[in-house]
Image (cartoon, rainbow, N blue to C red):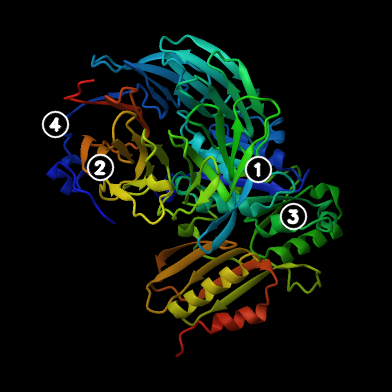
Amino acid sequence: MDAAEKIPVTLITGYLGAGKTTLLNRILTERHGKKYAVIVNEFGEAGIDNELVVGADEEIFEMNNGCICCTVRGDLIRIIGTLMKRADGFDGMIIETTGLADPAPVVQTFFVDEDVRARVALDAVVTVVDAKHFLATLAEGHEPAEQVAFADLILLNKTDLVDAATLRAVRDRIRSLNRFARVIETVQSGAAIEEVLDKGAFDLARILEIEPGLLDGEDDHEHDEDIQSVSLTTSAPLDPQKFSDWIRGFIMERGVDILRTKGILSLSGQDSRYVFQGVHMVMDSAWGPAWGAAPRSSKLVFIGRNLDAAELEQAFAACTVVQ
Amino acid sequence: MQTQPLETPAMANPDVGARVVSDRIALRDMTLPGRPYVTGLSALAGVGMAASGDGALWRFDLTGASAAPERVLDLGAMPLAQAAAPGGGGVIVGTDDGRLLQVDAGGGKRLLAYQAGGWVEQIAVHGMTGRIACSIGRRLLVLDAAGAVLSERPDHPSTIAGVAFSDDGGQVAVSHYGGVTVWPTEGANAISERLEWHGSHLAIAWSPDGAFIATAMQEKELHAWRMPQGKSLRMSGYPAKIRSLSWTPDGRHLAVGGADVATVWDFGGGAPSGKAPMEFGYVFNQVVTEVAANPRSGEIAAAYDDGAILIGETSSGDALIARPGDGAPVTRLAWTPDGAALVAGAARGGIAVMRRRDATV
């Protein structure tokens, strides 16, 4: 089954009270012609206006599959398997995680099970941020930062409750954690639903470009941030073997620290783009469209911890073909 | 990979349409109206009962009459688990609205247990004692044949993924994250035994002689423990997700489905290690979705994701075609208690009954 026929799954994450359920209910109400299966934590079922709501236990196990080690939501694999047997079909699936959830196991689940991969496809990670409390929550634990780092789309919510200076400070912090996600400022999670659904953020066939987030000038604030985004580019063609050896070793060794990876590469001797993306050690890759007459260049981004931009730039440059 | 010869030369042709049912098998194909996914299937004496993804329970004839399947009950919920009821006159069904039901072949139903909001996902019935075990999330419930609660074990390391009785029905084993827990079926303060092995254990099967507990894991591994000692046995990894386990009635062989062949492990002599498993039924890139050992003979049925079904013989490795396949994966496979007929359910409403033409039983 190709990507177009798979049921899209939207993951909504964010700290307690940020506005996840408001967003979820907006999707369900506005797309009333479409049928969604909603999966939430079992205690979060109340207050969701939908026929098909499944309470999940968020049961995570650590899976060792050869040299890949990753965390997986076993309960999601089971639930998705059962949902697929239902006679009443549905158009999409929305998973809302609890406030302290780490998005990684949810995302990885969509790549490690063949039955899940065959029928559903993760569409995007949407993180809802409470503008009023975000900066304070960062001090309480690592989850709020991770939820932002994992996002493809961030709803910077409750902007009506903060002044312009606070809003700018929160926006800067978000940018320093995740330079690649789209940020939409909202009141009551009021982003246009077309911006939230059908993003294809994990669809290798749709990763045609990696857009850096728009910055208001250089980010020169010093943040005591342990998660950062690093972007590597080169217009020199990459040596496929050198790159493969480097990236494999890097991901295996440092996978725990690497939250998300995305790349569009120009490989020497190949007419097609090479596209890949990953979460920790779980990577997914494919040949993309042909370069044709377009100028060839490679772009690789990492969001993670303990990333030394200089070290990475040097290692990446070493993978180019020696002219 | 050792491929075994298949009886009909037409098998050499990879074309699905070229497959021909063995002339030793009488095949009857039926389709449930609406083509729903067959979620549960039980082969009773003379009648089969199936559950489907539209919430219905069906009965169909197994005596050779050509009647269409009959809808006997609308559950009003998604059926998640099913097993033949004690006595064989009906089925035990678990639903996604928290009900454990006994339903007879005429559609008469009786509520055995209920947990609001729960998913009754796993059911096992012990033939001789008639005991019923079911799981609802992390909770295990054991009932006697009349439906009285024998024991309740409320907590396990994760949602229970599989349930199996010991040979004498005195114990029940459940699979979950980190391994398997074995409980006595009775006794409120009974102590459990934990069989540990890191990972997510899914399907579980306890050999009919009680000697081994086998599990299929999310990590594409098989695992087994020798009982009653609980000694872990090393088993090799599997090339694909394991979908089905079935022990032969003598407890000697374990059939495994998930790859493009049915794999049969020999547990004779106390362990499978060191012996290459037998493989049969290579059908050119079709995944084995279900395996079922005949309760009376050495035959093993293997069903595929294109709907094809083969019946193999453990002693010779020969296999014959019982069903050519129509593109829809087989989801359930069961032999009748006398071993004379094989029944299958599929993903788009297909129900097939296969009977040996020369059956003397």
Where is residue B114 drawn, in percent x and y? 62, 19
Amino acid at pointer 2? Ser
**Nearer the observer, B12 or B154:** B154
Distance from Cα at disc 4 to Cα at disc 1: 51 Å
Distance from Cα at disc 3 to Cα at disc 2: 57 Å
Q: Nearer the viewer, mark 4 or mark 1?
A: 4
Distance from Cα at disc 4 to Cα at disc 2: 21 Å
Identify whether A323 is placed above or below B1: below
Confirm or deny contact between disc 2 and disc 1 (CB under 8 A). no
Q: Name the residue under label 3.
A: A143
State which quarter of the image contains the C terminus of chain A: bottom left
Read off the chain for label 3.
Answer: A
Where is residue A33 drawn, in percent x and y? 54, 32
Q: Nearer the viewer, mark 3 or mark 2?
A: 2
Distance from Cα at disc 3 to Cα at disc 4: 63 Å
Q: Can residue A93 be seen in this view?
A: yes
Q: Mark 1 points at which residue?
A: A58
Identify whether A316 is placed above or below A283: below
N-terminal of the pair, mark 1 or mark 3, is: 1
Read off the chain for label 4.
Answer: B
Q: Which mark is residue B23?
A: 4
Q: Mark 2 points at which residue?
A: B315
Amino acid at pointer 1? Glu
